[in-house]
Amino acid sequence: MCAAIRSDWSLDEVRELYHQPLLELIFQAATVHRAYQATAEVQVCTLLSVKTGGCPEDCAYCPQAARYQTGVNVHKLLPIEEVVAAAAEAKAKGSTRFCLGAAWREVRDNRDFDQIIDMVRGVNALGLEVCCTLGMLTEEQAIRLKEAGLYAYNHNLDTSEEHYGEIISTRTYQDRLRTLANTRRAGLTLCTGGIVGLGESDEDRIGLLHTLATLDPHPESVPINALVAVEGTPLADQPPVDALVMARMIATARLLMPRAMVRLSAGRVNMSDADQALCFLAGANSIFAGDRLLTTPNNGTDRDGALFARLGLSPRPAFKDVPAELPHP
């Protein structure tokens, strides 16, 4: 089963895929996964918060929003040397992609952005794929990042356009899509996905996947996050996400976007080894490693190493199948 790469999926087609019996869905996704990916390889990424807290946005899930009392320790932009040292440590532990996260609403053309540019240069020089998630940005800013050696830009859609207003009011869905378009025009790879567990319906999950799968070309990386509910945020009392729902989301994403890296992202700390194994079988081939994801807990390197050994998985090399026009040290 070698599915064609399509960006013209109808909402009904996505709905039909998503609502299949789960075992049949996972079988189909696993078959497509084997046709397009090296299934024993998993991309190992590390995410570092280079500027934490104090964000003016009101994302209902986020402990870094200034308006919520979540106990997050606010800090300004980290020194460049500290970031490059953290990237070198991550590489030594097996990561091949290093992501810089700043709790900003948008990128501004100032000294902080100049410092980010220098961070990108430093991490790229280590031979790592460099990703940034800095909020909204213009095409000109995206070009500066690419020229510094940026490989990917992360800007998640979070949920469906219909549910979006229940989660965020300080920017629009179109704002997010505009940033993705600016990133793509600059020649960067896209990292964009969503969060499961925001009080959304199945129809919202289908809508999110439809939006992602009709981007042309598809995002190169699609993170599927399970909400990590944080005390002090409006979504603090949301129930834990069912691992079978995560598997269903991942399998559908794999069928819709066969060449994408589908990342089993936030929320793994609450999943058993068997839960994670099912998600890898369903088509996940990327994770975040390390003890923390920005400000929330994550599986440690030792636990992931043991899991990889049990499942016969190995880290995917950096810059594998990289398009010729993208930076490569």
Image: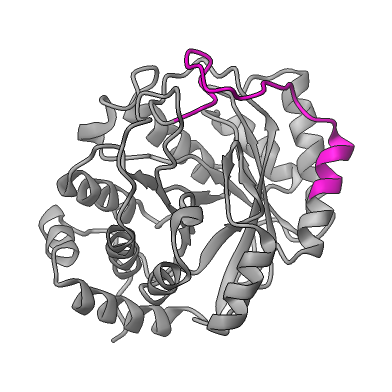
> Is 12 positioned to the left or the right of 90 in the image?
left
Figure quadrant of the N terminus: bottom left
| Residue 133 x, y percent position in the rendering | 58, 38
Magenta-drawn stretch contains 19: no
Horizontal arrangement in the rendering, residue 28 relative to residue 142 (left or right): left
Residue 189 shows in this picture: yes
Reply above or below: 243 against 226. below
Q: Residue furthest right?
A: 81
Quadrant of image for the C terminus: bottom right
Q: Which residues are magenta?
A: 62-86
Q: Position of residue 205 (x, y in %)?
A: 24, 48
Residue drawn 33% across and 84% down? 31
Q: Position of residue 39 (x, y in %)?
A: 49, 81
Q: Residue at x 41, y 31 (%)?
A: 61
Q: Magenta span: helix, strand or loop, mainly? A: loop
Give the tally of numbered discs. Answer: 0
* Residue 323 visible in rendering: no
Task: Please state if 148 lies on the left or on the right of 137 as rendered.
Answer: right
The picture places residue 260, in percent across and down from the top left corner, at 45, 64
Residue 76 appears left or right of 261: right
Q: Nearer the viewer, residue 225 or 43?
A: 225
Image point 76% across, 56% down: which residue?
90
Task: Name the colour scheme.
Answer: one colour
The question of residue 66 being in magenta is answered with yes
| Res 325 → quadrant | bottom right
**On screen, 274 above or below 192?**
below
Residue at image position (85%, 39%) is 82
Closer to the camera in the image, 243 or 195? 243
Residue 127: which quarter of the image?
A: bottom right
